[in-house]
Image: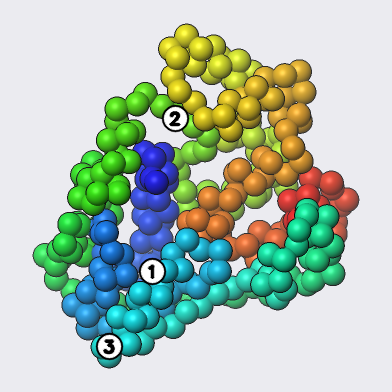
Amino acid sequence: RLSPRRLSKLRAAVEALRRSLLEKCGGAILHVGVADDAAAEVHRFCCRLGASEVYVHDDAADLNVKGLRSLRALCDASDLHVHAWHAPLRSVAGALGLAQAYDEYVAAIGGAPISGLCLAPETLPSPPEFRSTDVCEGGLGSSGIVPTMDELTRAARETADCASQVKLREATPYARGLGMDDAGEAQARQSVKTFLEHGSEGLAEQLWGPPDGGVQAMATLAESAIPVSKEEWAFRRVARTPSGYKGLIPGEVFSRAMSEQMLWLGCISLREVATQLLVASSNASSEEVSTALV
């Protein structure tokens, strides 16, 4: 399911994480590969590395619940111990899925406090020694370097599921889509800062350019007959009206700008963003900030 833009964004996020780890512990091991069975690949890598503990993000909304179950089964048969961790934004998060409508959801979280921040340690222990020649089956192996986009694309062709996606993307001249290629903690924090200082319109223009750009984009799409998702088509159609980005659904700009950074890539925590929004809403009343908090 990785488009070229999302693959580039994932690479940028990993590179930002690598730089952060280098500052905290002087080294980082990156195991990069594309496997039909991710749980088995993680298990093989941990055994090869001589690890004894495996920490995995456990999120009920994660698409990898089945993979975590498989990893537990593999580790139970060896000396590896799996530790699942999670950091919910609110303590009532587990009950929010029971809400049948948006109003019920808002009412459910209305009086629920936001969990406190978990501060990262200033330093971390150095990673164990590893051989840069270690190569995973169908992957790029273990090293301290993030592979190039060409290397990642070639690796994606090693599995049937990813290969079909790559061929589809290469054969069809899709429009690039919304979003940016860059990702990382600094970029995520800058987006939040822009939103708090200039609102949704300022953030939208920083990410996607002026609303008038939508007119040119739509004309280009019409002339070249490039297939484009209904979602993006609707977004561009609203943005090019006289109302510009103001015509979008309240909270849509913030959600589009931050969802990948917070939920998919984990470049910035939900708690940190929520804390900044709470501080801003306490200093000055803002409907945009209140909507983003919801």
Circle 2 residue: 176
Question: What x and y, as percent, mark residue 122?
Answer: 48, 75
Q: Earlier in the sequence, mark 1 or mark 2?
A: 1
Kind of residue indicated by mark 2: Arg
Q: Nearer the viewer, residue 227 or 85?
A: 227
- Number of residues whose C-alpha sits closer than 10 Å to that of mark 3, classed few (under 14), some (14–19) or many (20 or more): few
Residue 92: x and y in percent read: 72, 73
Task: Write down the residue under mark 1.
Answer: 67
Label 3 vs label 1: CA separation?
16 Å
Q: Which quarter of the rendered picture does the C terminus lie within?
A: bottom right
Q: Residue at x 26, y 88 (%)?
A: 78
Residue type for callout 1: Gly
Q: Residue at x 78, y 54 (%)?
A: 101
Callout 3 amino acid: Ala
Frontmost residue, 94 versus 262: 94
Identify the element where label 1 is drawn: helix
Tell which residue pokes out farthest to the top in this image. Answer: 223
- Mark 3 highlights which residue? 77
Left or right: where 155 falls relative to 292:
left
Give the class, few, some or many, for how many residues have Cα within 10 Å of label 1's Cα (few <14, many ≥20): some
Task: Identify the residue shown where x is 35% and y is 76%.
Answer: 71
In the rendered image, the vertical position of residue 226 relative to residue 201, given as above or below: above
Image coordinates for residue 135, horizontal then vertical, percent: 15, 63
